[in-house]
């Protein structure tokens, strides 16, 4: 039995990420189709192209390491994508749907940021400078996407809130604050 090393963890994590990116290539078009905001739809479409490039970068890393290009089922991303599918099957409309989509998309980004951060650190530690460079580029793009989603959410969440403020069961901020024992 071969000794497990940091390099074997690195390769295993890359396989996991490769599969995660492939799952996202299938999920992002559905999210784009469901989005009602043109800006959010465009963002999902742009991230789809980035995601394809992320998979290509992982293929380059495998090649540079002399490893076969293959994925390993990423159960974490599978769960996150399943949750996103549930969101899309809800009867949310307009900005409310878009707010829910942003929340689902940010779960994806945070998962990827954590995973790419780890493999980037491994690559640097092992002196795999080409891999580290490619992974750093992807990590930066994932962080930028997360920030774009955060920026978009500020307007979309406000629209979703204002659009639903008159719904039965909704309370106004002051009423909630008074119940919580604070006065604003």
Image (cartoon, helix red, strand yellow):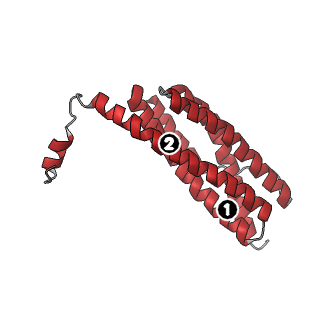
Give how far across and how far down residue 59 sits, in percent: 79, 49
The label on residue 119 is: 1
Name the residue at 79% across, 60% down: 130
Numbered disc in front, either 2 or 1: 2
Q: Is residue 79 visible?
A: no
Name the residue at 58% across, 55% down: 113
Relative vertical location of residue 97 with respect to residue 134 in this rendering, above or below: above
Q: Is residue 127 visible?
A: yes
Q: Nearer the viewer, residue 1 or 87?
A: 87
Callout 2 secondary element: helix
Q: Nearer the viewer, residue 95 or 82?
A: 95
Relative vertical location of residue 75 with respect to residue 95 in this rendering, above or below: below
Q: Quadrant of the N terminus?
A: bottom right
User: Neighbour class for label 1 at 10 Å: few (<14), some, many (≥20)?
Assistant: many
Callout 1 secondary element: helix
The residue that mark 2 highlights is 149
Q: Quadrant of residue 4?
A: bottom right
Give how far across and how far down residue 116 sits, in percent: 64, 57
- Lower sequence index among marks 2 and 1: 1
Contact check, label 2 and label 1, Cβ < 8 Å: no
Q: Is residue 139 left or right of residue 172?
A: right
């Amino acid at each position: 039995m071969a000794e497990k090393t940091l390099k074997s963890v690195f390769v295993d994590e890359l396989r996991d990420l490769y599969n995660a990116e492939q799952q996202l290539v299938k999920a992002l078009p559905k999210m784009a189709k469901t989005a009602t905001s043109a800006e959010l739809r465009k963002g999902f479409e742009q991230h789809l192209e980035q995601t394809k490039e992320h998979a290509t970068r992982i293929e380059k890393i495998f090649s540079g390491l002399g490893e076969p290009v293959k994925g390993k089922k990423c159960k974490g991303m599978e769960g996150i994508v399943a949750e996103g599918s549930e969101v899309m099957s809800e009867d949310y409309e307009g900005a409310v749907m878009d707010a829910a989509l942003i929340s689902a998309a940010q779960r994806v980004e945070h998962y990827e940021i954590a995973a790419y951060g780890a493999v980037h650190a491994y690559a640097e530690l092992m002196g795999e400078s080409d891999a580290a460079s490619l992974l750093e580029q992807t990590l930066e793009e994932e962080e930028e996407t997360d920030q774009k989603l955060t920026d978009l959410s500020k307007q979309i969440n406000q629209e979703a809130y204002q659009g639903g403020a008159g719904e039965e069961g909704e309370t106004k901020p002051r009423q909630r604050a008074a119940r919580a024992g604070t006065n604003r």
